[in-house]
Amino acid sequence: MRHQPLRILLADDLPLWRAKVRSILKANSQCQVVGEACNGLEAVQRTAELVPDLVLLDIGMPILNGIEAARQIHQHSPAIRVIFVTQEDDVEVRDAALDTGAEAYVLKANAATELLHTVDAVS
């Protein structure tokens, strides 16, 4: 069991989706959302600033997609874990995402039932 809350950055271009994920994470007292990003470039920058334990990252974001953002995050901070939370239900996209070093891949359609379990497993 963790003594400190798991510090999480949410990165998704949809504010309503970020709010939904935040509400899902509130069910676990060991999760603390420390910041949000609305595009991939901001996700990379906010990760460097905040140094979270975990980044929940969408793939289809403007300016810099989530796959490239994950590559840059891992290049600069290899210890930070990434979970993709996306609507991209494609094997090739999933494989490319996981090839970045990401820990897991959760479909948005399944987030309500799978996200907390996946975050617990990764942490």
Image (cartoon, rainbow, N blue to C red):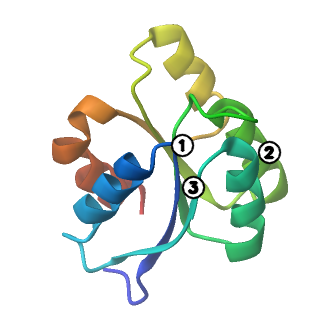
Q: Which of the image's four quarters has the C terminus?
A: bottom left
Foreground mark, 1 or 3, reads 1
Residue that carries the numbered disc 2 in the rendered image = 72
Give neighbour class at mark 1: few <14, some 14-19, many 20+ (Cα, 10 Å): some
Q: Nearer the viewer, residue 53 or 8?
A: 8
Q: Residue 13 lies in what quarter of the image?
A: top right
Residue at 67 percent of width and 53 percent of height: 43
Residue at 43 percent of width and 88 percent of height: 4
Q: Secondary structure at mark 1?
A: loop
What's the residue type where badge 2 is placed?
Gln
Q: Residue 97 lies in what quarter of the image?
A: top right
Q: Is residue 38 above or below residue 32?
A: above
* Residue 35, position as x, y percentages in the image: 55, 70
Give neighbour class at mark 2: few <14, some 14-19, many 20+ (Cα, 10 Å): some
Residue that carries the numbered disc 3 in the rendered image = 81
Q: Secondary structure at mark 2?
A: helix
* Residue 92, position as x, y percentages in the image: 54, 9
Callout 2 touching callout 1 (CB < 8 Å): no
What's the residue type where badge 3 is placed?
Arg
Q: Nearer the viewer, residue 16 or 53?
A: 16
Callout 1 touching callout 3 (CB < 8 Å): no
- Left-right relation of 22 to 47: left
The label shown at residue 13 is 1
